[in-house]
Amino acid sequence: MKKIKINLDKCLGCKACEIACAREHASSENLADAAKENPKPKSRIKIQRGIRIRNEEERRAPFGESKKKLPKKAVYALRCRHCSSPRCVDACITGALRKDKEGVVIHEADKCVGCWMCIMACPYGAIKRDPASKIILKCDFCLGRYTPACVEACKTDAIVVVEVDDSSGILVEEVVEEIG
């Protein structure tokens, strides 16, 4: 089973993955034409900035402490993790979300009614609303491609595809969490 791993220490926040994802989901063949599309193609991955907390001591910065002692801001790529037991699939009232035999959580747009139950159920905040189409946007692992566009676009190898054993769903989640 393939999984995308993200190494936070290597991510520069350059957003090349966002651009590659939007370009992959555009109707145009090249980036210049994709940028002119209306509505604009949307990325299924998002670079976020936040405080990276490595341990409990960092989480509880004493009141009044200098900002220099607080954890450094980090960048991270927010995207669907294609969980072993996806809560979004369980929450979907129309069956628009399903897990395929490869372990990818698939969104069938024609079945989606835009109820946002999957957005509320996702523990990672990885599913987005698309106000234009009034349905969700989520990573589809670039169906039809051997390597997802975000992985190909990442020049620091912060985003990589790995093969993991699916004999235990818990193990798969632990492997992905370890780096991401």
Image: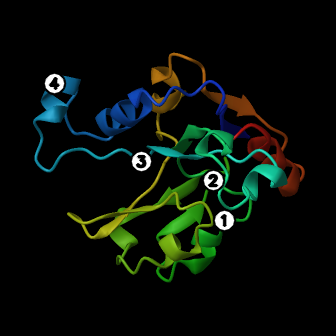
The residue under label 3 is which amino acid type? Arg
Q: Considering only vertical position in the picture, is 26 above or below 145?
A: below
The residue under the point 10% across, 35% down is 36
Neighbourhood count class around disc 3 (C-alpha, 10 Å): few under 14, some 14–19, many 20 upward: many
Q: Residue under label 2, please give it.
A: 82
Residue wearing tag 4: 32
Q: Nearer the viewer, residue 58 or 133?
A: 58
Image height check: is 6 above or below 102?
Answer: above
Is residue 72 found left or right of 28 in the rendered image?
Answer: right
Amino acid carrying label 2: it is His
Please identify the quarter of the rendering in which residue 43 is found: top left
Residue type beneath disc 1? Pro
Looking at the rendered image, the quarter that the C terminus falls into is: top right
Q: Quadrant of the N terminus?
A: top right
In the structure shown, which secondary structural element does the residue marked by tag 3 occupy?
A: loop
The answer to whether residue 30 is seen in the rendering is no
Nearer-N-terminus badge (3/1) = 3
Q: Along the polypeptide, which appears first: circle 4 or circle 1? A: 4
Q: Which residue is mark 3?
A: 44
Task: Give me the residue at 48% from left, 49% from top.
Answer: 139
